Amino acid sequence: MSKKRERNTKGKIINAAWDLFYEQGYDDTTVEEIIEKSGTSKGSFYHYFEGKDALLGSLSYIFDEEYERLQDTLNDKMSSFDKLLYLNSELFSMIEDRIDIDLLTRLYSTQLITKGEKHLLDSKRLYYKLLRKIVSEGQKANELTLDMTVNEIVKLYAMCERALIYDWCLCNGEYSLYSYAKSVMPVFLSRISM
């Protein structure tokens, strides 16, 4: 099976699962429903995932899909700082609209206790590649500080995002993640701007 076909099959399963999780809740979604909605087979499902719980770690895939879409919408005339803020606000808007907060909470808790792969920290993800590209361009254009390395700035940005998501989960979504981040992210990131 080609890599692209494998990625498409896995992506179909992940997208179907997260749609169902959002629509009817994690506990009320069965593997059979995921297979049916994704238009794949039981063999394909179990080729990629040991079971429904294994899908919790796949949220980073959904995030990266959103970043893939967003990178095509970035305006070249925007400063690097503004690109980072744009990516954040678009992702957080998507999270509020499409991701069940209980699932997000579950994902964060599994990432805290897992002894295996921590998907959110995988530096090979599109998320980190895109951030490194924007930060590197920003430093070359003298828009972002040179007092920190590209990786230090990316780590700071990612930590700020995770902190906001974590707090939103702790507060059970009692405020708008999108609106709060829009006012707080510039403050968090003010140190990186020139």
Image (cartoon, grey):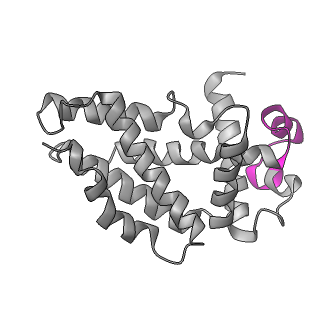
Q: Position of residue 101 (x, y in %)?
A: 62, 66
Q: Residue furthest top?
A: 2
The quarter of the image holding the N terminus is top right
Residue 12 can be seen, yes or no: no
The magenta region covers 35-52
* Residue ID at (45%, 38%): 127
* Residue ID at (26%, 58%): 187
Along the viewing direction, whichever of 169 and 100 lies nearer the viewer: 169
142 in relation to 56, above or below: above
Q: Position of residue 37 (x, y in %)?
A: 76, 55
143 horizontally vs 171: left or right:
left
Q: Position of residue 189 (x, y in %)?
A: 28, 50
* Residue ID at (61%, 37%): 119
* Residue ID at (82%, 62%): 29
26 horizontally vs 5: left or right:
right
Q: Quadrant of residue 141 in the image?
A: top left
141 horizontally vs 179: left or right:
left
Q: Main secondary structure of the magenta part?
A: helix
Along the viewing direction, whichever of 49 and 174 lies nearer the viewer: 174
Residue 51 can be seen, yes or no: yes
Q: Quadrant of residue 79 in the image?
A: top left
- Does the stretch in magenta take in 47? yes
Along the viewing direction, whichever of 173 and 46 lies nearer the viewer: 173
12 in relation to 129, above or below: below
